[in-house]
Amino acid sequence: MSAVAACAASVRDKEMSHVNPREAIGLDLGRRTVAYDDRDAILYALAVGARATELELVFERDLRALPTYGPALGLWAADALGERGLFDVSRALHGAQRLDVLEPLPPRGELELTARVANVWDKGDAAVFEVEVDCRQFRSVAAIFAPGSGGFGGERGPSAAGDPEQPPSATGSVQTTPEQAALYRLTGDRHAIHVDPAAAAAIGQPRPILHGLCTLGVVVRELARIAGAHACDLRELAVRFAAPVLPGERIEVRTWETGETPTRFAAATARGTVLSGGEVRFA
């Protein structure tokens, strides 16, 4: 970055640091055309654990794109918000994710995405920015947890949903691989904490961590198996990211059938809960 650009960025950040986060509600984050081909869709499927025998996910002849690829295609929106200087991007976390599938993703093509800040919640010592990405195929809402940005006098917002206290209706498990984060990075999220031990140590992790959206993609495939459905038939998904997965850990998945839809779910490794307050519905 040139000295002039650095100075301009510094001035912008100082200006934005005085903006009340509440004023970001409704902020237009722009429009973007995102293109991908069948190779990208296959790479994503492999990165979340698809097997060579699942031809509809790994062979272009009759390819179906996994719906959980949608939020990955919309990650630019959270980056666009971070560039506004409303919070410290080095401390921000992907706290929760919602996905509503409106129609199947094409196996290849171009998506017209629009993004905005749907809401901002004041958690006291942190703010939560809800970044909504819309297109014809899906609506994705990522909750960005920003430590140090709260206390601005806004509404606290809804509390995180807890998991049912009764024993689960069904369980499953899925083994991640030591290489999974390195592979998933090639789908677009190349943050160093997923591959560089030094970067992971800087955020208090013993080694590089799995992407939250990768964990979610892996778990949704197991949820589909438990439900006797196909992962491509996902219709609704909501979850809170409780803790990261270390590549190579086994993820235990629990579901609860409460007599209502969607189905409740959670996931954990031997170190504790990684996904909580989950809700999922397949067609």
Image: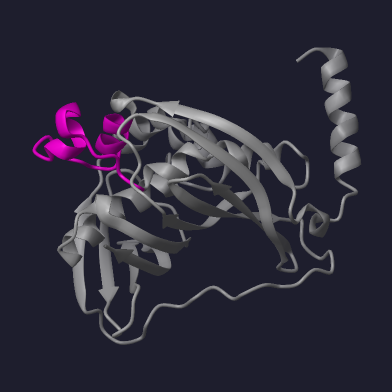
Image side of residue 102 versus residue 3, left or right: left
Image side of residue 154 versus residue 43, left or right: right
Give residue 234's position: percent from left, percent from top. Answer: 31, 57
In this view, 108 is above or below 6: below
Can I make out residue 211 in this image? no
**Residue 45 or 165: which is nearer the viewer?**
45
**Residue 172 or 91: which is nearer the viewer?**
172
Color encoding of the figure: one colour
Give residue 38's position: percent from left, percent from top. Answer: 29, 27
**Residue 183 or 98: which is nearer the viewer?**
98
Can I make out residue 177 in this image? yes
Q: Quadrant location of the C terminus?
A: bottom left
Tell me which corner region of the image, top left, top right, bottom left or bottom right, holds residue 224: bottom left
Give residue 29's position: percent from left, percent from top. Answer: 69, 41
In this view, 100 is above or below 85: below
Give residue 82's position: percent from left, percent from top. Answer: 69, 40
| Residue span colored magenta | 41-67
Count of number-bearing discs: 0
